[in-house]
Image (cartoon, grey):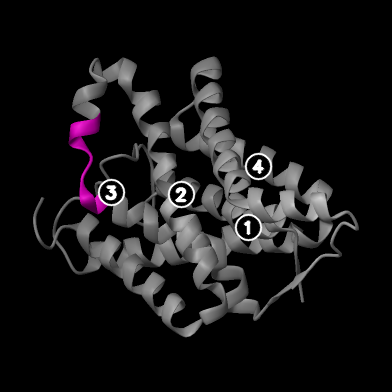
Amino acid sequence: MEALSYYSVMSLILALTWILIFVTKEELRKEMLIISIFSIFLLPIWIATQAVAAGSMQALFSSLSFLDLIFLFSVAGIASTVFHVFFGKHYQNMPKPKRKKERDVIASAWILGTFFGLLLFVWATILLTVAFGLTTSVALLIAAIILAVYITSHRHDLLGDSIWSAIFTAFIVFLASTLGSAFTSTTPVIPFIQTNEFINGVSLDLIYWALALGLVLGPLYEFIRRKLLK
């Protein structure tokens, strides 16, 4: 891949945005790191849905690059915290269960809860893709909407977090994509995201990905860790 390809410039802009949030928002660092690291589990969405068409899962795995990891790592971290950045929201703990055993379970199981939440997101996307013949991006967005509805139906205070996280994440990705095209002369191609339509030169499928990650990752940490916004 060329040093200054569209994809590398866009990923660099997103990575710098991630670093800016991480440096300036100390209270969000744990959430950013955990969600960003766990974003690697989103890669099976692309691998599983493309394996049949490509005919070789091994070839698909070998085609993944470090730049793909940077892209997902950055977007996931941004999506999980961007609502707090724009609205200045902070956390406070929800009332803890009275029984010590329940408190200990919640304290020790939240990382597993985050992992299984993302795993559910992945499998919902794969099932929608296989069962209904949807493109990966559309299936991802529908799965995100379903999970966001589940989360916000149990925690109404996270509705704004979910919606605005999706909007802000899509805006940042749209801006990074636009700058990637403006500063390079290469074709706007993202290896693991199918691109069928464009809006103002930006892949519509890319926007679907950004919206989906914002919808789910925005409120996920607060939902799993039982954190209230204040």
Q: Nearer the viewer, mark 3 or mark 1?
A: 1
The residue where tag 3 is placed is 68
Confirm or deny contact between disc 3 and disc 2 (CB under 8 A): no
Along the polypeptide, which appears first: circle 3 or circle 1?
3
Q: Which residues are magenta?
A: 61-68
Say which element carries label 3: helix
In the image, residue 88 above or below residue 129: below
Looking at the image, residue 136 sits to the left or right of residue 190; the answer is right
Q: Nearer the viewer, mark 4 or mark 2?
A: 2
Q: Where's residue 169, x and y in %?
A: 51, 62
The residue where tag 4 is placed is 145
Judge the density around disc 1: few (<14), some (14-19), many (≥20) Cα neighbours within 10 Å: many
What's the residue at 22%, 51% (across, down)? 66
Along the polypeptide, which appears first: circle 3 or circle 4?
3
Location of residue 117 by image quarter: top right
Q: CA distance from mark 4 to mark 2?
A: 20 Å
Q: Main secondary structure of the magenta part?
A: helix
The residue where tag 1 is placed is 221
